[in-house]
Image: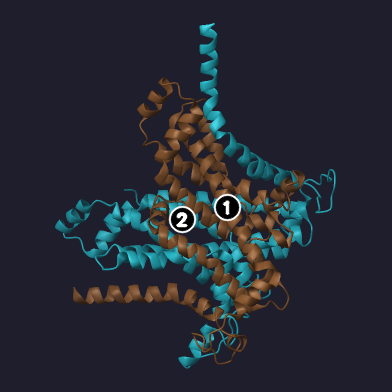
Chain colours: A cyan, B brown
Amino acid sequence: MKKQSYKSYQFRQKAIPYLFLAPNLIIFTTFIIFPAFVGVYYSFTDMTLFTFGTPNFIGLTNYIELFQDEEFLAALKNIVLLVIATVPLIFTTALLIALLLVQPIKGKNFWRAVYYWPVMISPIVVGIIWQWILAGNFGLFNTTLKLLGVGPIETLINPRFAWWSVVFAKVWSRTGYFMIIFMAALLSIPQSLYEAAKVDGASRLQRFWHVTYPALKPARLMVFILLTMEIFKIYPMVLTLTGGGPFESTQFTVQYIYETAFKSYQIGYSSAMSVIMLLFVTVFSAFNFFLQRGGKNS
Amino acid sequence: MKNKQIFLYFIAVLLTLIFLVPVIYIIASSFKPMNELFSANPTFFPREFTLDNYIKAIKRGNFLRYIFNSFFVATTSTIIAVLINTMSGYALAKFRFKGDTFIIMVILSTIMLPLEVIMVPIFSVLRAFGLYDSMWALIVPAAATPTGIFLMRQYLLTIPDEIIQSARIDGASEWRIFYSIILPNAKPAIATLAIFSFMWRWNDYIWPLIAISSPEKYTIQLAIANFTGEFGADYSSIIAMSAISMIPMLIVFIIFQKQFVQGTARSGMKG
């Protein structure tokens, strides 16, 4: 009798961690992992938004079509270029500002709070703010140019300007976040390393390259991966800033996937795009990972 | 040395302008009357102060309702997030069990599956489960976050095992140990998770976009985005809505600045 209840006690004890994990795991599998598999399945079918029942299996047709779809290829190229332009920019800006804020200056907490604050603004509103500043001849941007005696210039109706304003708005809204990560990493570098470098007669720049930069390796790696993932997912901010225009110049993959599914109703086709996009995200993250690892080893 | 100091302050002030002016400008604009908003000779601050834009925004399409919806979603989802992520963090921090590495892999894999990219099948799944156009579709799925789990796990590792063991010897049930020992001891981490979770849900656009169709269930972000997309969008009320939507975040930020900074520094606080 006693033995039996001990056994059931043991069994219960074994079950407990699984029970504690259950709510999270159920949500993850139901709403993230299962849909991902469903998406892979759809990508081989002719599923539309109005297909009820089983869609037809059409093999690789969607994928073949995809690589002849110029709009998709343009969106894909666009997002890759955006990652290449934005990731190093935010990375560098965040690191420079972090370096500034670990110098002995007064009011550190104030500066830090101000630079971090845009992180708290939703991407939708960030888009609105910059749209309002940049658009038209009478926005803050062109009015300021006029005061300086230049302009007005074409802003969001110019494809190139619109594209770079996406980059800029992203830098503006996300730098503060990565600045904090870099600051924490900078502050954790032991002061003795700098002292030693100083004794050895290292210049300020040398100290940065040989002490600071190698010591930042874990933070750098993390910032790179987080940033790449984030830029790949860009959508809401662009939606209110440029709407993807002009002439699709700021249309990135997520927007095109969304519109193919919900405006052209082609679920199967857009799922194939998602699969390609997931591959891209994975490859880029892995690339960043090895890039950072392959660098100067400390 | 002196010059260097001046240079540092100069940069600091310049950056302050870059980060602050756009926000001040949108707030200032929200108090401008119509003719000033679209004037060919705009000023930075309103010449004539008016609340018209706000009144119009409130009258238009149930603006207060959207704010209420956002509060409801953000609050309930945060409560659920704290509960279930702490439970998972506790299991991963204080138990050894079969398949724990596998479970960690499952949790990590969700980071590699961005919501934005798999919106379409998520939509199908919500529809199949009859959750489409339900507020619960915004609240429950979003409450589970890998970041939340790892944050809690990290913190709970610091709680000594002896406390848990002695409670077990005293005959406390596991659930009781969880809510009377683990939860109270994890307060600092819970505070961090809670404010981040609130911010993620308040600022979220993707879940509402996938899950909601009826206007009376719009969150504030979804409402702003949809109004912007309309033909001949009415910017005067959109700006007022945007300004209001920032207020709760500003308050949360001022009160909990320390938690935000520490949470971010602990890195990777991503919804």
The label shown at residue A224 is 2
Among numbered discs 1 and 2, the one appearing first in the sequence: 2
Q: Is residue A292 above or below residue B156?
A: below
The label shown at residue A234 is none
Label 2: few (<14), some or many (≥20) within 10 Å? Answer: many
Left or right: residue B257 compared with residue A151: left
Residue beneath the point at 48% across and 62% down:
A87
Image quarter of residue B53:
bottom right
Image quarter of residue B227:
bottom right
User: As drawn, which residue projects farthest toward the top?
Assistant: A1
**Label 2 marks which chain's residue?**
A
Q: Secondary structure at mark 1?
A: helix
Residue A163 visible in the shown view: no
The front one of A107 and B78 is: B78
* Residue type marked 2: Phe
On the image, numbered disc 1 is attached to which residue?
A281
Q: Are discs 1 and 2 both within one chain?
A: yes
* Residue type marked 1: Val
The front one of A209 and A215 is: A215
Locate residue A286, reporting x and y percent: 51, 48
Label 1: few (<14), some or many (≥20) within 10 Å? Answer: many
- Assign the N terminus of chain A to one quadrant of the image: top right
Locate residue B197, reporting x and y percent: 52, 52
Locate residue A239, reporting x and y percent: 63, 68
Left or right: residue A48 compared with residue B92: right
Residue beneath the point at 44% across and 34% down:
B180
Q: Secondary structure at mark 2?
A: helix
